[in-house]
Image (cartoon, grey):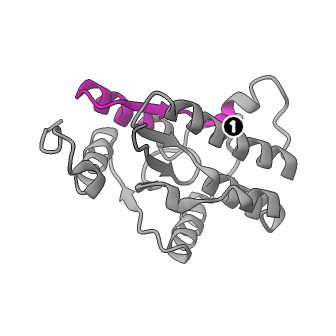
Amino acid sequence: MSIIHRIAVVGPESCGKSTLSAQLAASMQAQGVRASHVTEYARDYYANRPYQVAMPDIEAIACGQLQAEQAAARQHDWLVCDTTVLICKIWAEVAFGQASPALLQHYRPQDYVLTLLTATDIPWQPDPLRSHPAERDWLLSLYQAELAAVGIVPVLLQGSEAQRLQQAWHALRQLPEWGGNSLKNNQL
């Protein structure tokens, strides 16, 4: 069984997480890396139900996100995770003032070898699952504070899609886990 390396892509809504996650996983695959893009489970969860949020919904989404990671880990060595339980934790704190004990049991930010945090420097895109267009900078500060509190130094991705992808690759190449990969010095 191989070691699974998880990359967390987190940040406020409408800040390019899904785009970056898909691009990074595809770019890794194109270079021969057994990588998978683990999509945002909340989209599947709300696909056939109204978007009404209660703590049990956030807990179910966190479990679904982790199950998607586990399923992808069966066939891939690297997972590019479009959101993690961190996003559920912040979501619960914003919506309800705190995360539930059940949600916190699933919160393991140290499971990721790299945390990519998307900046708010791209235009807001409306979406039925997005609700905080004017609070993205505040939300970014919540992510930064939480990551600092658990001792994780994220890589802040800024700029265009191409710049963000390049920044992600630069961070990936710096990882000790990437060191044994024969593609370490490849350029995009």
Which residue is disc 1 drawn over? Answer: 42
**Residue 115 visible somewhere in the drawing:** yes
Badge 1, how many Cα within 10 Å: few under 14, some, many 20+? some
- Which residue does the image show at 69% across and 28% down from the upper left? 44
Q: With 95 as the anchor, is 90 left or right in this view?
A: left
Q: Secondary structure at mark 1?
A: helix
Whole-percent x, y for residue 171 in the image: 28, 54
Above or below 78: residue 155: below
Does 33 appear in magenta? yes
Above or below 91: residue 122: above
- Which residue does the image show at 44% across and 40% down from the upper left? 80
Q: Which residues are magenta?
A: 20-43
User: Identity of the amino acid at label 1?
Assistant: Ala
Whole-percent x, y for residue 174 in the image: 23, 57
Q: With 35 as the anchor, is 166 left or right in this view?
A: left
Residue 103: name its quadrant.
bottom right
Q: With 170 as the anchor, is 60 left or right in this view?
A: right
Q: Quadrant of the C terminus?
A: top left
Q: How many marks?
A: 1
